[in-house]
Amino acid sequence: MTQLVIGVDFSSRPSRRKPIVLASGTVHGALLRLDGLQRFDTLASFGQWLARPGAWVGGFDLPFGLPRELVLALGWPTDWAASIAHYAALGRPLIRDTFAAFCNSRPVGGKFAHRACDGPAGSSPSMKWVNPPVAYMLHAGLPLLQAAGLSFPAHTPGQGDAGRVALEAYPGLLARELIGRRSYKSDERAKQTPDRLIARKDIVEALEQGRTRLRLRLKLSAAQRDALADDASGDALDAVLCLLQAGWAVGQPRWGLPPTVDALEGWIVSA
C-alpha cells in the first residue's frame, strides 16, 4: 500500500532567506520516493497548506510538548491541549524570562529540564530558547498544526483528522546514525565548507542505499540528489530526514511510539 508522507524543517520566523521546507514523498514497502520540495516564507502560507484537505503522515522538526518537570514547577496545566494553549498565549520575552529564571535557580549541569525522549533522541530540551531556539519553534509552530485539525497520536489519540497524522521528528537523530558527529550544514556562508558538502553527500548516499536502522531506501532523481547536497544550509536535507522518519512510522504499530508515552511531553518518532 502506497502512503503519502511529508517531512518539515521548521523555522519559527520564516523568510525568503530561511524558509520552512516541506519534503513530500510516497512510501511503498521499503521504498520511499521523494516527490518534491516546497518552501514557505511565512507562517500564514504554511498554515494554509496544512489546512488543505488530504491524507498524509508528517514528521515535523519542532517539539510538540514541554518537559513535565518544567510544567509542574511553573504550575501550568498538565493537560497537553490546555498546556499548549497557555504557552501559546505568552509572548516570547515572557517565555525567555520565565525559562531563564527556572534555569538560574538550578545547579550547574542541570539547568534545563528534559523530556523522556531527549536522551534516546539526543535532542535539545524543548524549553531551550537559544542555539537552537526550539522553545520558540514550539510556540510558533504547534498552534498552526492544531488549528489545521491534525491528529496527534502521541498526545490526543483518537482525536483530530485521522487522515492527517502529525508526528514529532528530529533530523539530527538519523544524521548522527549515518555520519556520527560530523557537521553537515550551516546558515553562515563562511562555515559552508567542502567538508560539510562531503558530509551531506555521504548522508544522501546512505539514504539511497537504505543503510539505516529504519530499513527504508530513498529514491531520488539526479537533480534531487544534487539539490540536497548543494543546499549548504541543510534545510532541504533535514526535511528529507524527517520524511524518512515519517515513512518509517507508517509501517509501525502505533506509528512507532513506545507502549507508554507521557501525553504531556510526547515523543520523537524513531527515538
Image (spheres, rainbow, N blue to C red):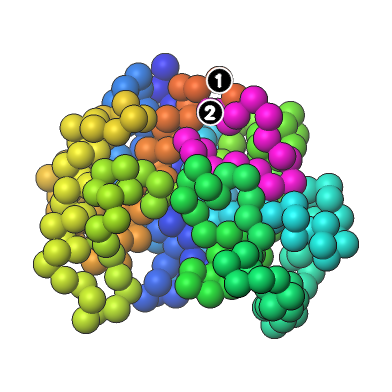
Q: How dense is the environment of label 1, judged by Cα within 10 Å: few (below 14), some, or many (20 and up)?
A: few
The residue drawn where x is 32% and y is 22% is 30
The CA span between labels 1 and 2 is 6 Å
Does 114 sit left or right of 84 as displayed?
left
Residue type indicated by callout 1: Pro
Where does the image place residue 231, in percent across and percent down from the top left? Answer: 24, 63
Observer-nearest of 68 and 148: 68
The residue drawn where x is 58% and y is 31% is 257
Region of the chain picked out in magenta, as a range: 255-271
Does 162 sit left or right of 77 as displayed?
left
The residue drawn where x is 59% and y is 54% is 63
As drawn, which residue projects farthest toward the top? Answer: 1
Residue type indicated by callout 2: Gly
Q: Which residue is mark 2?
A: 256
The residue drawn where x is 60% and y is 29% is 258
Residue 240's place in the image compared with 187, above or below, is above
Q: Main secondary structure of the magenta part?
A: loop
Where does the image place residue 52, in percent across and percent down from the top left? Answer: 58, 46
The question of residue 262 being in magenta is answered with: yes
The question of residue 54 being in magenta is answered with: no
Q: Secondary structure at mark 1?
A: helix
